[in-house]
Amino acid sequence: MKIKRMIAILFAVSLVTTGAAGCSSKKDGGGKKEAMGKYVEKQVELPLKEDEEAAALTEDGGNGAVLYSRNMEDGTYKAYRYDGGRFEEEDASWLNSAIKSGGTLSKVVKGEDGSLYALYGDENAMTHIIRKDGSSSQEIEIPDLAVKDGNGIYPLIGGIRVDKEGNIFLTVPVNGEAVMYDKETGGKIRSFQGNQFSGLLAMPMDVRDNRILLAGPDGSGLVCYDTGSGEVAEEIKYADMAEDGILRLGDSDDCILADSKGLHHLTMGGSMAEDLVDSGTSAFGIPQTNILDLAQIGKGDYTVLLSVQETSGRSKHEMYRYVYDKEAKAEPTHTLRVYGLEESAAVRQAIAKYQQKHTDVRIEYKTGNAEEGTGTKADSIRALNTELLSGSGADVIMLDGLPADSYIEKGILADISGVLNEAGKESHLSDNIIKPYKKDGKIYQIPTRYGIPLLIGSSSTTEAFKSADALVDYMKDHAWDDVMDQVDKESLMKLMLNMYYEDIVDKNKQIDTKLLAKLMETVGKAEDNGEGSVTSISTWGSDEGQPESDWDVGKFGSSDKKDTLSSKEMKGIQGMMVPYHYLRQEGASPSDVNGIFVPHDIAGINKASKNTELAEDFVKMLLSEEVQSIDVENGFPVNEQAMEAWIQSVEETPDEEGGGISIAVGKASSDGGEGEASVEEVITFPHQSEVKSLAETGKKLTVPVQKDDIIREMILDGAKTYFDGSTSAEEAAEDIAEKADTYLAE
């Protein structure tokens, strides 16, 4: 059962132990009482110079917080004390005496014993712990940290705390354990089981007064152990915690949790939480953001250090302060409703940025898949249609997968030409993306980002995909194994819908049953490989990963089939890494797919909205350079200044250490046998010239593929009845057309 939420205005008493204040109220001009008091966010300007980056933040027992920085040129560290108003530089020689060239600081904490401790990794990725000793430091020997696993990797440590006796507590995210080590011998005393955070170098944990607090093993909340006995002392029912949280125990039976959902106060043994700061109105909710450290610099005064991933793959750091303001309105004056069938990181980004600037507006973001078990996608669309046709519904509608043309015909969507004109005064918007959406001089919907589908491989084979009829003819004399390696019928059918949707489903939503039947017969010739189509990050024999787009079909760079093709939708710079690595090796060039682009985050405004001005402002935020300059892997920006910022963020020859990833690569065995030897290659970010070239390709695309998700699913489900032999292709196509007609008549 999910935890019941309780916001600040419902608290009747002041939470003195955490500094959370109660609420006041005052009368407005009409005599109505207005709830007052809430935590407000303020970005803190960091004192860092151009060659410095933030490394860690720690609180200092009521004496403010200390920010540690690293010089990116020589690897030395500095310390800056923050009192809530300004920074003062302090000595950090104790770090520099221990962390040599190649080492990287990850955490600094003040133990309950009053000493400062640091966690850092050396050039071999082995973790070390040091304790401040005047202007130098002393290493704390933990034998377990020097033991490699079966893959030759040292233990990955997510966090450190120290109790009042000086015993060390380390978290191991991959198995969810927090391990207590003896201060003298470094030997393991006992371990405490928390929740597993696979692949993350962060894990919620705090130690205080012989207690250790962790995310519970079953994911239902937090668990507090007695560090002396190892027994469970208390629990907090809290099933709403994200995986990126930081915990701080309070003086009493309470704690503070910071995660991507906001800043929360919880009480031991309880099942209710006070949301001090909500992610939707703060930096906590911005995608591409990781919480590094949380420091309480005074009662009810919290400071958070965040890492924000930039388009280039590098990270920048931001710091925010949260203080209770009794004069601030507890509740926003206005509410703006946004709806989309599926969750979007780009929309979340815009919501967070918008609400940071408009604190008197709350944005309610609802999606069709927000809750599990509430019905099908068709049910979600029908419920939305009922609202819209009754003159209600969301103010801003993200139209991806929705029957947008039908909404325009029924007069549901407002003309947003004026919005685009205003947005175009601040930044130039891509004409080729906007123009296809003009109807009689008006625009009712606009993609705020777009994907670029590419065919990668033999140019002669690429010609076969220029039209549906050309492909049908070509495949009469070819097998799919000779055209695209490692494919299955379902993925191929999705690809056919992507490429030829406007030929299959005309502007009147009528299905060309003859063409659909031919395509099903063509796809039906494929022999499923039993594992589904190759995924977007698989290459040269690697089968791991998950597809990011239903355009992602076919294996990259098959060593024994040089003329095969793969299809890939480019939605961001990181998504270019593997395909362009292959293209670079083969000396090949990608080609667009018949001038097609894939619209993403398509925004429209409900004509019946009572908040038209707010809705227009939000759409402008979606199109702004501020939002579009961030790559969230959901499409390239339509804002051309933002696209230029993407290009400039990437180096012409990216450094392997500056964002490269290692992948397992299958190569033919050296002895000429049938097996494949697995080797490792480093995949870097694409080169600046490659990003620029792809952007130029994007400027030439003029054909949007905007599918009605219900009709799409009808076609895919109907095709399966042919693939499994239940019906003929003609019968399946006729049945699909009949169902589509019934759906459109509703």
Image: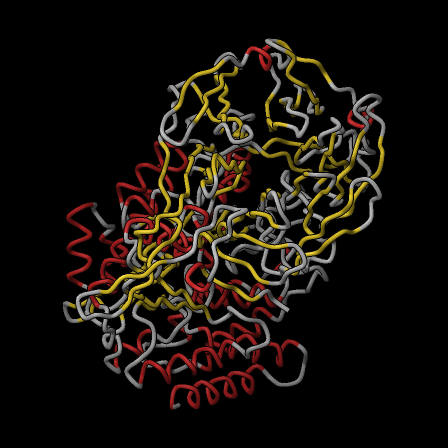
Q: Can residue 453 be seen in this view?
A: no
Q: How many labels does the image show?
A: 0
134 left or right of 157 in image:
left
Which residue is depicted at the point 67% across and 58% down?
A: 269
The spot of residue 369 in percent (x, y) is 51, 70
42 left or right of 214 in image:
left
Quarter of the N terminus within the rendering: bottom right
709 left or right of 392 in image:
right
Image coloring type: secondary structure
Which residue is depicted at the point 17% across and 66% down?
A: 29
The spot of residue 554 in percent (x, y) is 59, 53
Give residue 337's quadrant in the image: bottom left
Above or below, 17 relative to 691: below
Q: Nearer the viewer, residue 561 or 335?
A: 335
Which residue is depicted at the point 52% across and 16% down?
A: 77
Give residue 585's quadrant in the image: top right
Q: Is residue 540 visible?
A: yes
The spot of residue 441 in percent (x, y) is 14, 67
